Image (spheres, helix red, strand yellow):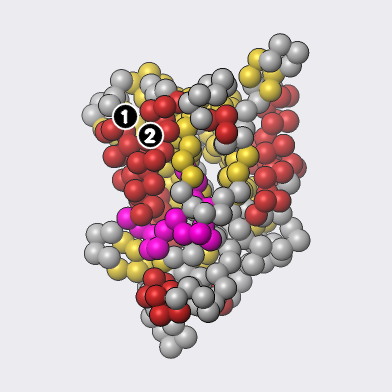
């Protein structure tokens, strides 16, 4: 076990990163196809090809998932992922052509680094070229490059975050894994003791507690921009689109355990589930474990992050 999304056979992860601009994108490749589900809980999502994941829709396999920075501009990176897959003959057979199915979700990182540099088709293609089945790189790479948390007091008092991964084996065969780019308006807390490990910082030191700040300000005084946590859960179990969707719903519990507050009107929190394999397991169990590995991935995202653009990371604050 690599404690990575790539512990699920058939999954590859690749990043494109622009450290200077503070943005990037991450591709999760499953070229042979995977049953997929999705659940969107945040009030400000930016997504592509989400509707077809509804269990009532016809297409039942996806070939990659794109997670990107750049706000809505970053959705263009999925074009490069499609081109990479098409060149290799992967996609939904529509008769006249094979059409790669690439759902995507983005986070808002334009308030850090350069707002005029965003992931594009070339970035998505490059992420595919970089994809591998070894341990997924974590921290300030890919979609996590410009990620921050704790913006209740403004960006200047936020904490740097990133992208993190985790996995767990249940019994001899079942593997459930998660990869999450954490860019929340709220704080990240350790559910073991409720301690804030990354969030809104007081000027005199220590954390302010984002929800407490919001309560005092009645959420009307300070602009809170630059949000959304997005991720992918992969399993080697045999799921349908319906059960994959249920697992995605349950996986959001992992965000709720570690991010406070979460799923706000200014977050676009979105989680995908990919089913690759034929292990027989109860979807309820898979969903429960998915919440666990999602929570662990959130903690990894802030613990693996490094300070950038004048913002410290948890390790700089003695919380990693």
**Residue at x 39% of width, y 40% of height:** 249
Residues packed near mark 2 inside 10 Å, few (<14), some (14 to 19) or many (20 plus) = many
Residue 37: image x %, image y %?
Answer: 47, 32
Q: Secondary structure at mark 2?
A: helix
**Residue at x 62% of width, y 28% of height:** 101
| Mark 2 and mark 1 residues within 8 Å of each other at the beta carbon | yes
Residue 245: image x %, image y %?
Answer: 42, 33
Q: Please determine whether, in this image, residue 294 is positioned above or below residue 9.
A: below
Report whether 209 appears left or right of 229. Answer: left
Please tell me which residue lies in front, 117 or 47.
Answer: 47
Give the residues in magenta.
257-271
Q: Quadrant of the N terminus?
A: top left
Q: Which label was assigned to residue 246?
A: 2
**Mark 2 vs mark 1, CA separation in Å:** 8 Å
Residue 311 in view here: no
Q: Please determine whether, in this image, residue 180 is positioned above or below residue 171.
A: below
Residues packed near mark 1 inside 10 Å, few (<14), some (14 to 19) or many (20 plus) = many
Residue 315: image x %, image y %?
Answer: 42, 68
The first of marks 2 and 1 along the sequence is 2
Q: Quadrant of residue 104?
A: top right
Q: Please determine whether, in this image, residue 11 is positioned above or below residue 66.
A: above
Q: Which residue is mark 1?
A: 283
Report whether 208 appears left or right of 126. Answer: left
Q: Secondary structure at mark 1?
A: helix
Residue 105: image x %, image y %?
Answer: 58, 45
> How many numbered callouts?
2
Direction bottom: furthest residue: 204
């Amino acid at each position: 076990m690599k404690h990575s999304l790539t512990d699920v056979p058939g999954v590859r992860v690749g990043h494109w990163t622009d450290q200077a601009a503070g943005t990037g994108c991450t591709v999760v490749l499953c070229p042979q196809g995977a049953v997929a589900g999705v659940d969107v809980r945040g009030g400000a999502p930016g997504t592509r090809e989400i509707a077809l994941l509804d269990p009532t829709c016809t297409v039942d396999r996806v070939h990659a998932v794109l997670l990107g920075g750049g706000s809505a501009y970053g959705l263009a990176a999925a074009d490069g992922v499609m081109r990479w897959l098409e060149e290799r003959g992967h996609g939904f057979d529509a008769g006249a052509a094979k059409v790669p199915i690439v759902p995507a979700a983005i986070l808002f990182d334009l308030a850090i680094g350069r707002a005029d540099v965003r992931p594009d088709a070339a970035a998505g293609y490059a992420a595919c070229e970089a994809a591998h089945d070894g341990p997924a790189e974590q921290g300030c790479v890919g979609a996590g490059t410009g990620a921050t948390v704790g913006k209740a007091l403004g960006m200047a008092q936020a904490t740097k975050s990133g992208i993190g991964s985790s996995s767990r084996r249940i019994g001899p065969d079942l593997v459930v894994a998660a990869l999450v780019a954490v860019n929340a308006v709220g704080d990240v807390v350790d559910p073991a003791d409720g301690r804030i490990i990354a969030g809104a910082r007081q000027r005199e030191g220590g954390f302010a507690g984002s929800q407490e700040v919001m309560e005092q300000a009645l959420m009307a005084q300070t602009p809170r921009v630059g949000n959304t946590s997005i991720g992918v859960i992969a399993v080697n179990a045999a799921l349908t689109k319906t059960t994959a969707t249920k697992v995605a719903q349950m996986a959001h519990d992992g965000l709720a355990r570690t991010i406070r507050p979460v799923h706000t009107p200014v977050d676009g929190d979105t989680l995908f589930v990919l089913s690759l394999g034929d292990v027989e397991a109860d979807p309820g169990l898979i969903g429960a474990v998915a919440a666990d590995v999602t929570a662990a991935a959130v903690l990894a995202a802030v613990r693996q992050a490094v300070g950038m653009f004048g913002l410290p990371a948890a390790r700089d604050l003695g919380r990693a």
